């Protein structure tokens, strides 16, 4: 599976938007871009995923670059409960569900 | 949404004993379950893939005789840490893939803290 690169940490103020970047320059044409987050002492939680088009759901938005070599997870209004480690993961449709986690981005949200 | 439950959430065991952690998919059938280990301030490390009714596939460097995985039904996988030692103390997390996986149906359990004393 192709690798992803994320900043180790980011800070945000509460109720402000947060843009979490992810680089995946070796992405293949069939790789889906998945985002998960992990709150302290919990298992990861699915956030969003996409292939080529931008995606929105109740949790976040995913903006995918035209060349697909990077993507950005957007939290429109950060809350204290959004403080977590965010993981950007590439997954192929043929993948059995095995997810390989990188180091992720630790998001701190300041009140 | 679908729920994956792990039990126990926390366990303390004595060095040299074995401990079993259960992973259950509560409202869906899981063809495949995965076990991860996570040390403090580190990312999740995949240990093994378990398919219902067949032997688990272990990642390189993971001792299959130490970490016994059983996936006896479509809703239950167990991880047994045999002859546990303090260095096995970690956060163990399972995930499950639904029968009708459409690309986002990988659900994670809440994790199990193992402390070996």
Image (spheres, coloured by chain):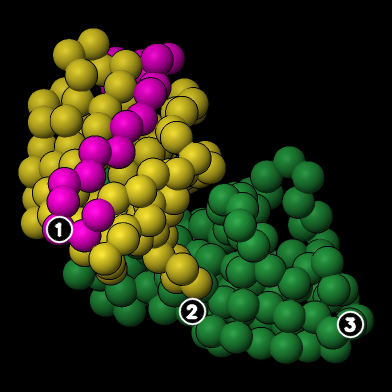
Chain colours: A yellow, B green
Give how far apart the Cα atoms at labels 2 and 3 are.
22 Å
Q: Nearer the viewer, mark 1 or mark 3?
A: 1
Classify 10 Å Cα crowding around label 1: few (below 14), some (14-19), many (20 and above): some
x and y, in percent, of residue A82 in the image:
28, 61
Marked residue nearer the N-terminal end (2 or 3): 2
**Span shown in magenta:** A13-30
Which is in the foreground here, disc 2 or disc 3? Answer: 3
Label 1, on which residue? A15
Residue at image location 31% in from the left, 44% down from the top: A35
Say if mark 1 contacts mark 2, CB within 8 Å.
no
Furthest toward the top, the residue is A67
Instruction: Name the image quarter holding residue A38.
Output: bottom left
Quick check: marks 1 and 3 in contact, CB under 8 Å?
no
Give the vertical position of B95 relative to A55 (above or below): below
Residue B73 seen in this snapshot: no
Total marks drawn? 3
| Residue closer to the observer: A67 or B104 | A67
Q: Which residue is mark 3?
A: B15
Residue receiving disc 2: B6
Give SS at disc 3. loop
Quarter-of-image position of residue B113: bottom right
Image position of A25 (left or right of A103): left
Task: Pinpoint residue B11: horizontal percent, then vertical percent.
Answer: 66, 87
Per the image, is B66 magenta? Answer: no
Q: Nearer the viewer, residue B45 or B19?
A: B45
Above or below: residue B1 compared with residue B33: below
Alpha carbons under labels 1 and 2: distance apart: 33 Å
- Badge 2 vs badge 3, beta-carbon distance below 8 Å: no
Residue at 64% from the left image edge and 62% from the top image edge: B40
Location of the N terminus of chain B by quadrant is: bottom left
């Amino acid at each position: 599976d192709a690798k992803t690169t994320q900043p180790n940490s980011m800070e945000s103020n509460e109720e402000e938007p947060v843009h979490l970047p992810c680089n995946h320059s070796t992405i293949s044409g069939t790789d889906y871009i998945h985002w998960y987050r992990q709150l302290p002492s919990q298992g990861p939680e699915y956030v969003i995923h996409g292939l080529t088009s931008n995606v929105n759901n109740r949790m976040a938005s995913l903006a995918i670059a035209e060349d697909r070599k990077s993507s950005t997870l957007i939290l429109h209004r950060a809350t204290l409960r959004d403080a977590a480690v965010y993981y950007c993961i590439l997954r192929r449709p043929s993948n059995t569900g095995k997810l390989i986690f990188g180091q992720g981005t630790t998001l701190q949200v300041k009140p | 949404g679908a729920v994956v439950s792990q039990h126990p959430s926390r366990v303390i065991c004595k060095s040299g004993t074995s401990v079993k952690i259960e992973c259950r998919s509560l409202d869906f059938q899981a063809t495949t379950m995965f076990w991860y280990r996570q040390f403090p301030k580190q990312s999740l490390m995949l240990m093994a893939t378990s398919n219902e009714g067949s032997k688990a596939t272990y990642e390189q460097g993971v001792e299959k005789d130490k970490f016994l995985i059983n996936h006896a039904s479509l809703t239950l996988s167990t991880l047994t840490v045999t002859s546990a030692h303090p260095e096995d103390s970690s956060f163990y997390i399972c995930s499950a893939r639904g029968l009708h996986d459409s690309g986002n149906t990988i659900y994670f359990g809440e994790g199990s803290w193992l402390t070996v004393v």
